[in-house]
Image (spheres, rainbow, N blue to C red):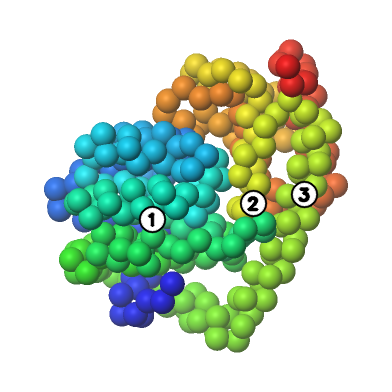
Amino acid sequence: MRADPADIVVTAGTAQVIGLLARVLHDAGAGTVAFEDPGSLGTRQHLDYWGTAHPPVPVDADGIRVDLLRASGAPAVLLTPAHQFPTGAVLSGPRRRALMDWARDGGLIIEDDYDAEHRYDRPPVPALRSMLADRVFYAGSVSKLLAPALRTGWLLAPPAHRDAVVDAKRCADLGGAVLPQLVLARLMDSGELERQLRFLRRRHRARRDAMIRAIAEHLPAATVHGAAAGLHLTVTLAAGDDEGGAIDRAVAAAALDRGVKAHPLSWHCQRPHPPGLVLGYAAGTPARIADGVAAIGRAVRALGLPTARP
Ligand SMILES: Cc1ncc(COP(=O)(O)O)c(C=O)c1O
């Protein structure tokens, strides 16, 4: 996606984007932002903090259900179209077109492009922003490419909201630290960032494959979601809803007792959902990943959950 540098507001990651936009959208009369379900617990906590209501809109294999978004009456939506968090779904062509129609009818879109560059088995999908710049706020960061500790991200706003975003950023912190931005510019100009991405793609693909093999061996009843891109897999452990998340929280706790940290899927759900886990693979070697999934398999068996498909 090409952008005029003057339109880019450098932020302290996507996290800051949520705070800035909560204020800007509230002032524009949009105090409610529909949110994908499942969708990131962290993002939802930020919306809560900033007083923005976030009615859930279900996600399926094609991404967010735009018919239900329309029915919700929400004036804005926050979504992860390139690689939905946590299911890994890519927003399909028909859904994109339906979403664009919804936006042309007055809806505002916040596009969180949080790990779109980490893809292995599929071509890149164009940013929604490139299709309808007048209605889409586009946010990204280097957190998944370099390090979250850099706290460096960016926001492109629709022209009608640009001045309000610049004001919000100025009043938040007078602008982000310049030194990390200069370092990032050097990494981009020198081609080093591209090389880093190619290196990471190779390494992550091997780690992802190790995790999929380990899941087939130790969690044969599980269904894997979202393997084509990203830095994590989501697995659902059984059919049927996990009311209140008791099952997957118990599995995550039993896994932690065995030294393995995994998010219960229910953390990221506002509505009932099958029990599941969100398993990151970026930080472990294939051997550690295999050991970790084996420990989760032991936790699942200890809790008496199904270990084979019916
Ligand atoms: C859905 C989602 N969006 C964005 C981010 C990145 O946030 P930041 O850019 O503030 O580090 C994360 C981090 O984990 C995330 O899970």
30 lies left or right of 247: left
Task: Say which residue appears at 56% left-offset and 45% top-offset.
Answer: 88
Of the numbered discs 3 and 1, the one sitting upstream in the chain is 1
Q: Which residue is mark 3?
A: 209
Of the numbered discs 1 and 2, the one sitting upstream in the chain is 1
Q: Residues within 10 Å of mark 1 (few under 14, many from 20)?
A: many
Task: Say which residue appears at 37% left-offset and 76% top-offset.
Answer: 3
Q: Which residue is mark 2?
A: 228
Q: Are marks 3 and 2 in contact (CB under 8 Å)?
A: no
**Could you tell me the amino acid type at mark 1?**
Glu
**Could you tell me the amino acid type at mark 2?**
Ala
Percent coordinates x, y for residue 25 in the rendering: 21, 52
Q: Are marks 3 and 1 in contact (CB under 8 Å)?
A: no
**Could you tell me the amino acid type at mark 3?**
Asp
Q: Secondary structure at mark 2?
A: loop
Task: Say which residue appears at 81% left-offset and 38% top-offset.
Answer: 214
